[in-house]
Image: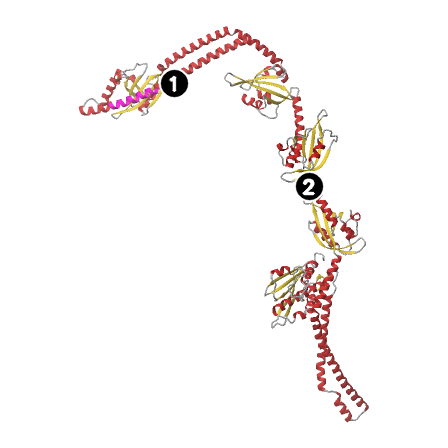
């Protein structure tokens, strides 16, 4: 009760102070308003007086000029004095003055209607003493109003304005003493303050007499509130507008380990956040209550208990507003929720872990109730099916299962009598768009803490790629099993991992024999180490190696194997295996060799007439020369017999006549001279013919050779010359043959007979092209030019003719087997096809055609000195 009376006393003092302040403030405002009004009024008076005096003075100036009266200025001042005298203000309330500056003094000519000559010297004021401020400003040609000291030293409100009459500078001032303006306001203020204090005293007395029952009830309620608050096992705190704690119950002090003095007036921010890692704080009650309202009236903060362990307090924050609805205080009620918080945090961690796992899982996860209705689906399910949550809700997720599998899945997974703990099925589902895919589905029962079945966890694993790969594998396996080519798959180190049945047929090694071994079990010894090193360098670099390998079957039989070996890469681009495709081409090679040999024989057969002609000519003159030598031999033998008889006659001592006769018959000088000249020529001619025949036979022998199995080093120019000799009868009647062979050209590693066939075909084709243009017996022969030279690491042969030439469509098909533009009987269409196979396929070279219709054709053959590939 005593505390209540103290509060009432304080309230009375506060109210008295408020009344005093209100009275003073209102009086001050009225005074300032009155002062402003007086200021405006005085300025208007001064301005109007100045205008009036100027008008009077102008009139007096006119009169003085006409009637020679007193000076106009003096007359004007007298008239103004008389006028002011009739309306003279009291000395204490106001004053109107007109002043003039005399050197450093101000002399007042009029003061409230009295002339200056009526004044004593006290009405002259020096300028430099700081008095008569309004008059000084007016004489300095300024106009306005101010509060300052007049010539008597009194504080006045004055309005001033300059005035010039007859070239005399004057200053007009109207002023009112400030004290006279202030007096009524001070009196009214004191009266209002006294009246207010009387009413306050009367109100307090009446309040005390009428509120004693209310005070008793309030005291009783306060005691009940105190027991309730102090007995509560919660932290109860009241916070004032300055964010300071104004009350805390005993439980709060005990819980926080501090006294009332320590907690009251402490900052609520220090209490809430001194042990928080957030570093947050609030600077107003509104900002403090907002987070709690956003969280349904609850605001949680971490806290360190006095015993050192970490706790968490949940605060219920309520605002206490005044009658005007403005927030005055906050009531904070805190409860220790550490155990609940830890349990919730653990549960959240479990849930977040579960959601994180399911979100990151590549497997679709669905949780259903007992009937299969959807409870939860992770993001993978939505990505897998392209369905939104609304579409999968309830039993809508059943629709993603293909209709062929849906009834069995629903019946087996969600049957009431289900006994299997885990069920797995592979089935098709609907994927985004119209695509279908395969999944591995698994259903696992889900139990609660009591062990009761509450639903199922369904997982769907996308196995579309696996199924597709499996199907492709089955197709590939069937294809490789039925292939006639052998398939071999090895590791990067060369160990065999797979062979198909064709491999077993080709090599004689069964799959059991080959697995785990290396392909060198087929090694025949026909290839050197460099060959295999080049092969491994090619495939290790990621390229495909193609070529022919001479291998050995399990039974020891040698065979030729056409091989293609390439790398197998994983998704990262790394080589993980090598796959080889092999084909036994031994029979094919034999057939091709026979075909080429037959074609050579066919070519030689076509040239047989010409060859026979070429051989017949030297044979004829060898025969004729032989007959000539034979007859010449008889003649010589006759002369020899004559000489022998002559020698015998001489030796026997015959008579001179007989000896003379024998001597005349012994030698025919003319015949001997003839024989001495013709016999050597006939012998030389015969030797040349025999040499010609020998060369033709040798060239035919080289061209008709059945072919080598291995390459050897040969003179390419010799191959060209042989072809020229054999084909002479084909070209010599239609064309002149020019050759420009590089004698420094190194030998090349080649199949001599096969290259000879190529050269022969090119020369014969050139001769036929010239015949087609110029005719078989031309007036003018064509030209066949053959040139050989070195170009880098290759030998180049060019065969150029000025025959008919070829259009582009013929060039495009020139190397096609059996394609020919010649007349029937002129060609089989195999020549250029075989030439291309020999040059490109067997010698790793190139053959190119440049042709222009009506101009001619040039075939360019480029052959490496050392073929890098292997013979096909």
Is residue 742 magenta-colored? no
Left or right: where 198 falls relative to 236: left
Instruction: Tell me: 794 left or right of 214.
Output: right
The verdict on residue 52 being magenta is yes
Residue 624, image x, y percentages: 72, 79
Residue occupying the point 38% across, 14% down: 185
Residue wearing tag 2: 465
Q: Residues within 10 Å of mark 2 (few under 14, many from 20)?
A: few
The x, y position of residue 834, in whole percent, is: 69, 61
Sequence-wise first label, 2 or 1: 1
Residue 547 shows in the view: yes
Nearest-to-viewer mark from 2 and 1: 2
Return the residue nearer the eye: 426 or 490. Answer: 426
Quarter of the picture containing the N terminus is top right
Give the residue number, with chain letter if any, for mark 1: 32
- Mark 1 surroundings: few (<14), some (14-19) or many (≥20) residues within 10 A: few
**Quadrant position of residue 355:** top right
Scheme of image coloration: secondary structure
Q: Which mark is residue 486?
A: none
* x and y, in percent, of residue 716 in the image: 69, 64
**207 sits left or right of 747 in the view:** left
Chain part drawn in magenta: 39-55
């Amino acid at each position: 009760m005593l505390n209540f009376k103290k509060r009432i006393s304080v309230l009375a003092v506060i109210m008295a102070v408020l009344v005093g302040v209100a009275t003073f403030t209102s009086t001050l405002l009225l005074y300032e308003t009155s002062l402003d009004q007086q200021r405006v009024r005085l300025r208007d008076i001064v301005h109007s007086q100045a205008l009036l005096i100027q008008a009077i003075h102008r009139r007096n100036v006119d009169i003085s000029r006409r009637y020679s009266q007193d000076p106009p200025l003096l007359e004007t001042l007298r008239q103004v004095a008389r006028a002011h005298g009739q309306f003279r203000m009291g000395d204490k309330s106001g004053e109107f003055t007109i002043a003039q500056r005399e050197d450093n003094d101000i002399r007042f000519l009029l003061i409230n209607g009295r002339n200056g000559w009526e004044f004593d010297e006290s009405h002259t004021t020096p300028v430099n003493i700081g008095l008569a401020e309004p008059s000084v400003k007016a004489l300095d040609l300024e106009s306005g109003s101010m509060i300052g000291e007049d010539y008597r030293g009194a504080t006045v409100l004055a309005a001033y304005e300059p005035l010039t009459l007859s070239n005399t500078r004057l200053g007009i001032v109207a002023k009112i003493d400030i004290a006279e303006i202030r007096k009524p306001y001070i009196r009214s203020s004191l009266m209002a303050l006294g009246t207010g204090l009387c009413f306050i005293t009367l109100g307090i007395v009446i309040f005390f007499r009428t509120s004693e029952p209310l005070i008793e009830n309030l005291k009783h309620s306060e005691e009940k509130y105190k027991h309730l608050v102090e007995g509560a096992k919660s932290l109860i705190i009241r916070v004032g507008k300055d964010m300071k704690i104004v009350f805390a119950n005993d439980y709060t002090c005990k819980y926080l380990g501090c006294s009332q003095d320590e907690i009251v007036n402490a900052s609520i921010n220090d209490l809430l956040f001194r042990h928080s890692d957030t570093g947050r704080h609030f600077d107003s009650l509104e900002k403090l209550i907002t987070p709690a309202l956003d969280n349904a009236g609850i605001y949680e903060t971490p806290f360190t208990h006095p015993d050192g362990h970490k706790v968490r307090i949940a605060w219920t924050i309520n605002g206490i507003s005044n009658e005007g609805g403005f927030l005055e205080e906050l009531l904070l009620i805190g409860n220790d929720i550490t155990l609940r918080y830890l349990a919730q945090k653990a549960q959240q961690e479990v849930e977040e872990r579960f959601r994180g796992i399911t979100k990151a899982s590549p497997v679709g996860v669905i949780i259903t109730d007992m009937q299969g209705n959807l409870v939860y689906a992770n993001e993978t399910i939505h990505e897998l099916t392209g369905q939104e949550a609304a579409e999968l809700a309830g039993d809508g997720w059943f629709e993603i299962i293909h209709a062929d599998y849906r009834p069995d899945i629903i019946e087996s997974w969600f049957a009431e009598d289900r006994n299997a703990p885990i069920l797995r099925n592979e089935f098709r589902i609907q994927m985004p768009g119209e695509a279908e895919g395969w999944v591995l589905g698994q259903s696992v029962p889900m139990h609660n803490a009591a062990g009761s079945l509450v639903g199922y966890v369904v997982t769907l694993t996308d196995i579309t790629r696996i199924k597709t790969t499996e199907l492709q594998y089955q197709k590939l396996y069937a294809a490789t099993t039925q292939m006639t080519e052998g398939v071999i798959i090895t590791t990067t180190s060369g160990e065999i991992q797979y062979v198909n049945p064709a491999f077993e047929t080709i090599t004689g090694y069964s799959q059991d024999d080959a697995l785990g071994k290396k392909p060198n079990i087929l090694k025949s010894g026909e290839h050197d180490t460099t060959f295999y090193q080049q092969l491994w360098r090619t495939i290790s670099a990621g390229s495909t190696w193609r070529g022919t390998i001479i291998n050995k079957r399990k039974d020891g039989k040698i065979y030729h194997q056409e091989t293609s070996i390439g790398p197998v890469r994983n998704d990262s681009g790394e080589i993980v295996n090598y796959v080889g495709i092999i084909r036994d081409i031994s029979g094919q090679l034999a057939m091709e060799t026979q075909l080429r040999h037959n074609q050579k024989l066919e070519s030689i057969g076509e040239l047989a007439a010409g060859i026979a002609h070429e051989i017949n000519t030297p044979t004829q003159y060898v025969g004729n020369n032989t007959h000539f030598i034979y007859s010449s031999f008889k003649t010589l033998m006759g002369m020899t017999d004559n000489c022998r008889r002559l020698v015998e006659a001489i030796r026997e001592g015959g008579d001179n006549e007989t000896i003379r006769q024998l001597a005349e018959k012994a030698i025919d000088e003319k015949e001997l001279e003839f024989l001495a000249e013709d016999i050597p020529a006939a012998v030389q001619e015969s030797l040349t013919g025999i040499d010609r025949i020998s060369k033709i036979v040798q060239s035919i022998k080289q061209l008709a050779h059945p072919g080598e199995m291995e390459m050897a080093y040969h003179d390419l120019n010799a191959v060209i010359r042989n072809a020229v000799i054999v084909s002479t009868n084909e070209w010599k009647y239609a064309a002149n043959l020019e050759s420009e062979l590089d004698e420094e050209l190194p030998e090349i590693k080649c199949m001599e007979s096969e290259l000879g066939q190529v050269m022969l075909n090119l020369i014969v084709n050139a001769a036929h092209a010239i015949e087609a243009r110029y005719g078989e017996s031309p007036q003018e022969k064509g030209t066949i030019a053959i040139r050989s030279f070195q170009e880098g690491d290759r030998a180049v042969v060019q065969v150029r003719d000025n025959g008919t030439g070829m259009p582009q469509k013929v060039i495009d098909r020139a190397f096609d087997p059996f394609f020919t533009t010649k007349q029937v009987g002129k060609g089989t269409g195999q020549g250029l096809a075989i030439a291309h196979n020999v040059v490109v396929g067997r010698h790793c070279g190139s053959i190119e055609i440049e042709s222009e219709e009506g101009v001619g054709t040039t075939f360019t053959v480029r052959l490496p000195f050392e073929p890098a590939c292997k013979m096909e």
